[in-house]
Amino acid sequence: MHALGLTSAQEATQVAEWAAQFPEVKAELEAIEKGLEVYAMDHAIQPSANTRKIIFNKLLNKEEVKKVALVRSISPAWKYAAAASILLLLGSVYFNMSYYNKFKEADTALQNSRQELITARDELKVMSSDMDVVKNKYSQAVSLNGQEAAPEAAAKIFWMKNTGEVYIDPSNLPEAPAGKQYQLWAFVDGKPVDGGMIITTKENKDYHIQKMKSFGRAEAFAVTLETAGGNPQPKGDLYVMGKL
């Protein structure tokens, strides 16, 4: 607008002050002014002889001369305002983009924190459940010791004397090979009875106390390594065993 001379005197003064204060604004406005001049020269239309005659005659008329004198010239000050507006716009875009990126980073960090909190809450819930089993006044712990197939292996049974419920902590069993799974057995009247498949993960630290099948009574417990899914009778190697 300033480059086209459409500003008020106050606005033109403000733009001039900006140009005096900021060399880059002055340079930009000068470039805009030059561009407008080049555009005007490139698109100028040569008037016809008749048109030139009419204009010349009007200029001879004093009243017309006065009217022409009232037309304001295009002030170069608006060029500074246009450049300043462009700079302000670019600055605003940069500012908004910068804070948008910071917002996205903060939002990602918040989502990660929420996920970590959910994971920690779930782990705490599992730990609390494990402690309820261990601390139960009816819980009788039975240590299962490593056998010939795995002398260093170990596990622990928690048998609830009041309900016959059975829980196992398999955290010290070796990682089961692909296609294999540990199976619990309870010896009732000297015979092995299926106690259920033990769920394990690739890392022992992820093992937790698991509820198995219930037994009203049992003399001992054992764990064998069977084909994934288990067998009706033990066929695999005996890993751990312990008497109640």
Image: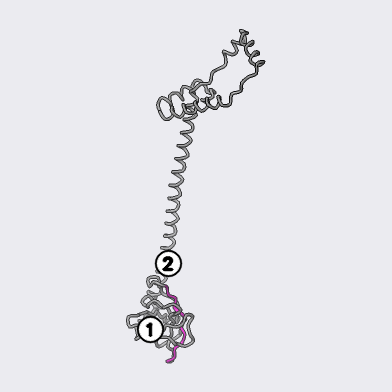
Nearest the eye: 17 or 241: 17
Could you say where residue 49 lies in the image, as x and y percent from the top left?
Answer: 65, 16
Q: Is residue 193 magenta?
A: yes
User: Please, which residue is most extreme toward the front here?
Assistant: 49
Q: Which residues are magenta?
A: 190-201
Q: Is residue 185 magenta?
A: no
Q: Are marks 1 and 2 in contact (CB under 8 Å)?
A: no
> Residue 24: which quarter of the image?
top left
Identify which amino acid the numbered label 2 is placed on.
Lys
Q: Residues within 10 Å of mark 1 (few under 14, many from 20)?
A: many
Q: Would you say residue 224 is visible in this rendering?
A: yes
Image point 45% across, 55% down: which residue?
A: 111
> Residue 64: which quarter of the image?
top right
Q: Would you say residue 169 is visible in this rendering?
A: no
The residue where tag 1 is placed is 239
Image point 50% across, 20% down: which residue?
A: 9
The residue where tag 2 is placed is 125
